[in-house]
Amino acid sequence: MASGTVFGMTHSHVAGSIHADAATRVPGWLSLPSDVNALLPRLWSENVSKDADGVLQVAGVSVDQIAEQVGTPAYVVDEQDLRSRARAFAEAFAGWDVYYAAKSFLSTSIARWVSEEGLGVDVCTGGELAVALRAGVDPRRIGLHGNNKSTEELRQALEVGVGRIIIDSFDEIGRLGEIAEELQREPRVMVRVTTGVEAHTHEYIATAHEDQKFGFSIAGGAAAKALQACLESPWLELVGIHSHIGSQIFDTEGFEVAARRTLRLHAEFARTSGHELSELDLGGGFGIAYTSADTPSSPADLAGPLRAIIEAECSQLGVAVPHLSIEPGRAISGPSTFALYRVGTVKPVELDGGAARLYVAVDGGMSDNIRTALYAAEYSATVASRRSSAPPALSRVVGKHCEGGDILVRDEFLPADVVPGDLIAVPASGAYSRSMASNYNHVPRPPVVAVRDGVLRTLIRRETIEDLLALDVG
């Protein structure tokens, strides 16, 4: 099967099953399970388990209860787990600012939870800013990102007093300066730079190489010019440099190279301008476990090497260690949530060479998780509503949409006796699933529910056909 290795992970080609060698249809990372009912703990939130009957439980509530109360599909958040992950970053990076990357998943409840656990919130649109403000997040602990912020978004940010704005273009420097003068505000700004470090992830989520829309190139000299332009603006308070090298990164190697390059820029700018910047943001992109092949680091494991890298480089350059910040998103929201589906049809398909695969179609699909189709992302799954004594069968969990690429879980071993009506749970579905959800084929988006201490509550209600029709004014 066509594949690529990413920090120890193996990802199938998006068309892998079609073009695979007929002798084997199982990707190298997927092992035949000794017990098809068992859960791999690192894929699931801390309060998820299966009872003696094989029914998945989260914080004292069974998936049968969840399906009965809110239906399927649904995103199910383990509140205590999400809070503990946010708190772990705050504790491991004590002395730094930790901003939750709202783009991974945002609701008023989520914004409140991470704020209560000591994190700021990083937003990249006016809509995300509005949610964070509605949640009561202190505007001074909000950062505004975005490569094409509108005049309205910048104005809103200045009016509410966000703590920092990440500058991403020369156009924005002028635009923000004009708005700041009009409002008589002096926003704190950081300049986003591209370091030339390409994270070893899918091309579309590796954001630090030069040929892309984000930031100013260090190597090309644009970053130094942008810093100088911000410094010379009478209405912008330049405080630092921002770097983000990509997503789903499992070690600190890329961060080390990026930190060295940004700190060299930091030191050179201090020498040429006489102005030593006070802050440095290393971005986010910390990886999580989607499959058995993924081995993410804990916040504590990440913090030590990053601190050492920064301290050593600053010492060598002869500059003070700036105030540091990071922006984890997926690492907090991703593992805390699973997606719950109900099986509608099961279709055994014979493949070349005598192989076979079960196509297990559920009541969701690419409209509630586009990542498999968009990035060839890998996921895992389990039958969540019962224990099975059947042998494992190579399976593919697919959706209900009118697309051949409507795949949720490309390769997984499920019980050979999976049938319509079974519940399927997909772990690590908290990041970018609901955030990137659509109404493709006019399918309403699923609800987001949270469970804590045996209590189920809705964070975002299920969309209805009436909601869709209400927008159609034609």
Image (cartoon, helix red, strand yellow):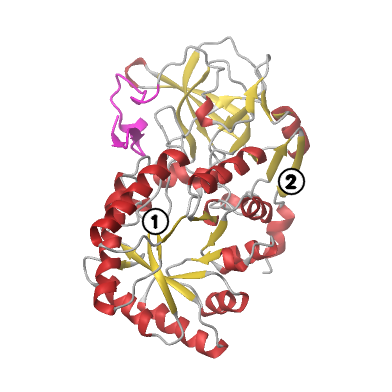
Quarter occupied by the N terminus: top left
Q: Locate residue 328, reporting x and y percent.
A: 48, 50
- Per the image, the residue denoted by label 2 is 458
Query: Is 23 one of the magenta-colored residues?
Result: yes
Identity, as a three-letter code, of the amino acid under mark 2:
Thr
Q: Which residue is at 71% across, 49% downward? A: 459
Whether residue 111 is situated above or below residue 219 in the rendered picture: above
Tell me the quarter of the picture where residue 7 sits.
top left
Question: Which quarter shows the C terminus?
Answer: bottom right
The residue lying at 47 percent from left, 34 percent from top is: 379
Q: Quadrant of residue 268?
A: bottom left
> Which residues are drawn in magenta?
1-30
The amino acid beneath tag 1 is: Leu
In this view, the residue in front, 87 or 95, is 95
Q: Nearer the viewer, residue 105 or 398?
A: 105
Q: In the image, which disc is placed on residue 185?
A: none
Position of residue 232 in the picture relative to residue 425 (left or right): left
Q: Which mark is residue 282?
A: 1
Q: Position of residue 451 (x, y in %)?
A: 71, 38
Between discs 2 and 1, the one toward the N terminus: 1
